[in-house]
Amino acid sequence: MTTTYSAFEAFRPHFNALAYVAYFKIVPKPSSGLKHTLHTAYRGFVWFLVTIYNLQHVIRVIQARHSTEQVVNTLFVLLTTLNTLGKQLAFNTRVERMDRLIATIEGPLFTACNAYDLKVMRRHAWIMSRMLTMYHGSIYLCGAMWGISPLVTKLSGEVELTGYFPFDTSDWMGFGIAVAFNTIVITLQGYGHVTMDCTIVSFHAQTKTQLQILRNSLEHLVDPVGDTGREICVRSTVYKDIEDPAFGVVLKKRITRCVEHYKLIVWFHNEVEALFAEALMFQFFVVAWVICMTMYKIVGLSLLSAEFFSMFVYLGCMMGQLFIYCYYGTQVKAESEFINDSIYRCDWVSLSPQFRALLLIQMSRCMRPVAPRIALIIPMSLETYISVLRSSYTLFTFLERK
């Protein structure tokens, strides 16, 4: 009996979390019209909060433009929230393309059809779910410290808030309102931001998983048994696809499915790359500045202060956020480079020259690896990750000299 398992199971927690914070629509679309209307209004309210929060920090940067330290204190937050805004726009202005990606994930070619596929896809879903949970936990911790740190610092002196507020924040009432607003919105944005990151990474990880499944299908292309384990061809001393015409038909169906599967994987990868090209380009160029400015703040803080701990957690989130992109980009490329090896491992010597020619054509098609890139130019790899960290250190030394 054939077992089916939808690849969308790996994305369900991500889209549920995005709908929870109103960063994307409910997937699948709710059957209740009232629920859809209320969620749309909720999304509008969250967009309003995010816009106000960003405007506060833009005004604060303008006000503090003559002070390097105050500008840095505000910019490392503003650049991160603008990065979040860019990803929100990518998700919400290209809804039809997102729907096509979701439909592809739920389609028959991306569905698990045997025990191996099921094992790989469930493992993938488990890893993506744990990664999402870990990042959500980090955001909750960072948000809590973001609220506690200024309150603790206030007890020993004045605190410079990162955003502009149109009321007096020197007294405890105004200060408490400002800190509460900042904490709630930054936690909301952080939650939405890491969820969008994990969702985009899950798209790339899904490409890697599908390539892994495809490789297994190619390695067992000439197996004389079906999915049920029943032998479906006769013992052959010549060419299997010629001596047993029925098995030849099965082989053609198998290779056709593998070709269609590979074509869909490549389309899926290219669509994900194009869909988030601008947002990821902004992130990779900005994250070097964010890491640099966070380090600039950290070196001036006491090791035992609450602000140091909050900045340290924030820095870990930024570095981890960049790492998961580069890690899975490297994994996708590595997996795609082994496709031709998998074709070679099948029992191709038992096939006719005509069928071998089909395999050679597929091998020539797979010679170019599927390699994720940022803005279609910069490789999304661990080498790029190291380069970004080096750039951050260079910027940090420049600021230190100033």
Image: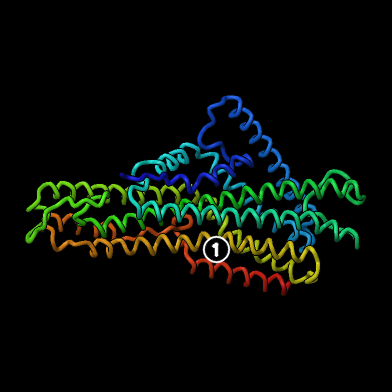
Please state the horizontal and vertical placement of residue 45, each as a whole percent of the image. Answer: 68, 35
Considering the image in quadrants, where does the C terminus appear?
bottom right
Name the residue: 32% across, 45% down.
2
Secondary-structure class at tag 1: helix
Please state the horizontal and vertical placement of residue 285, each as a whole percent of the image. Answer: 57, 60
Q: Is residue 383 visible?
A: yes
Query: Which residue is labeled 1 in the image?
Result: 323
Foreground: 61 or 21? 21
Foreground: 183 or 220? 220
Q: Is residue 378 visible?
A: no
The total number of labels drawn is 1
The kind of residue on which mark 1 rests is Phe
From this view, report whether residue 2 is shown above or below residue 369: above
Considering the image in quadrants, where does the N terminus appear?
top left
Foreground: 287 or 183? 183
From this view, report whether residue 187 is shown above or below residue 396: above
Query: Residue 40 appears in which quarter of the rendering?
Result: top right
- Give the residue at the far right of this rendering: 171
Please state the horizontal and vertical placement of residue 7, each as a whole percent of the image. Answer: 43, 46
- 98 left or right of 188 in image: left
Name the residue: 61% across, 25% down.
34
